[in-house]
Image (cartoon, rainbow, N blue to C red):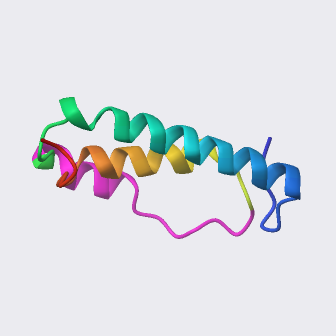
């Protein structure tokens, strides 16, 4: 299901729950996470270079993009 630029309250709740689930999982995995992940950072940045879409889309790819960015950056929350 794609999301419009002005999502309904139910869609906002779904996106909020997906974001919360991601954050809880992300923070729970910090104890095993490396301090940096720059090895593929340039490739990741180049693969995601694009203008924002004109219409709403799926929320899951946005969470995946955040995860890709986090995996290819510095992690000051790690050990």
- The percent position of residue 9, horizontal first and vertical second, equals 87, 57
Question: Quadrant of the rendered structure where residue 74 is?
Answer: bottom left
- The percent position of residue 16, horizontal first and vertical second, equals 67, 51
| Above or below: residue 31 compared with residue 47 | above
Residue 56 in sight here:
yes
The image quadrant where one finds the C terminus is top left
Q: Which residue is drawn at 31% across and 49% down?
A: 70
Of residues 25 and 63, which is closer to you in this image? 25
Question: In the image, is residue 27 part of the stretch drawn in magenta?
Answer: no
The answer to whether residue 76 is left or right of residue 70 is left
The answer to whether residue 67 is left or right of residue 74 is right
| Above or below: residue 25 compared with residue 44 | above
In the image, the segment drawn in magenta is 39-55
- The percent position of residue 76, horizontal first and vertical second, equals 17, 55
The answer to whether residue 50 is left or right of residue 53 is left
Of residues 12 and 48, which is closer to you in this image? 12
Q: Which residue is drawn at 12% across and 47% down?
A: 36
Q: Which residue is drawn at 50% across and 40% down?
A: 22
């Amino acid at each position: 299901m794609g999301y419009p630029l002005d999502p309904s309250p139910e869609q906002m709740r779904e996106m909020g729950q997906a974001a919360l689930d991601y954050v809880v999982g992300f923070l729970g995995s910090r104890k095993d996470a490396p301090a940096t992940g720059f090895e593929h950072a340039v490739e990741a940045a180049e693969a995601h270079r694009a203008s924002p879409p004109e219409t709403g889309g799926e929320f899951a790819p946005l969470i995946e993009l955040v995860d890709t960015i986090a995996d290819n950056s510095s992690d000051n929350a790690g050990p």
